[in-house]
Image (cartoon, rainbow, N blue to C red):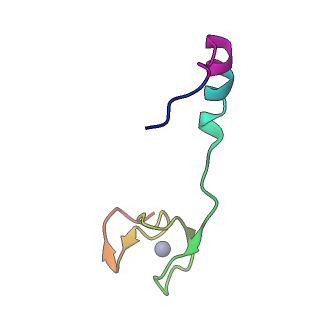
Amino acid sequence: MPVPKRRKSKSRQGMHRAHHHLAEPNNFITCPNKACGQPMLPHRACPACGQYKGKQVIAAR
Ligand SMILES: [Zn+2]
């Protein structure tokens, strides 16, 4: 297992973690529900119609 050559200082650790919340996936797909067709994240229920793999899994908006 790889081991870091130099330990990050507490300051650098904070600098690194300050960007954690910025990480957002941008690989959107289009909803396969023909009535919807909204951009959505792969392997997630559609936020617009609430369907995943042709089934209603969350309440639609
Ligand atoms: Zn949808």
Residue projecting furthest to the top:
10
Residue 46 picture location, percent across and down: 46, 67
Q: Nearer the viewer, residue 59 or 4?
A: 4
- Which quadrant holds the C terminus? bottom left
**Magenta segment:** 6-14
Q: Is residue 35 left or right of residue 13?
A: left
Q: Quadrant of the N terminus?
A: top left
- Pick whichever, 17 or 24, lies toward us: 17
Counting from the top left corner in percent of width and height, residue 36 is at: 52, 79
Q: Is 18 above or below relative to 54?
A: above
Residue sitting at x 66%, y 33%: 19
Observer-nearest of 36 and 12 = 12
Residue 17 placement, left or right of 58 = right
Q: How many marks?
A: 0
Residue 38 at what x, y percent from top left? 57, 74
Check if residue 12 falls in the magenta segment.
yes
2 over 46 or under it: above or below: above
In this rendering, would 41 be left or right of 1?
right
- Which residue is painted at 45% across and 71% down in the image? 49
Image coordinates of residue 51 in percent, x first then y, are: 38, 72
Q: Which image quarter: residue 60?
A: bottom left
Residue positioned most to the bottom: 34
Residue 15 lies, with reference to residue 51, above or below; the image says: above
Q: Residue at x 60, y 36 (%)?
A: 21
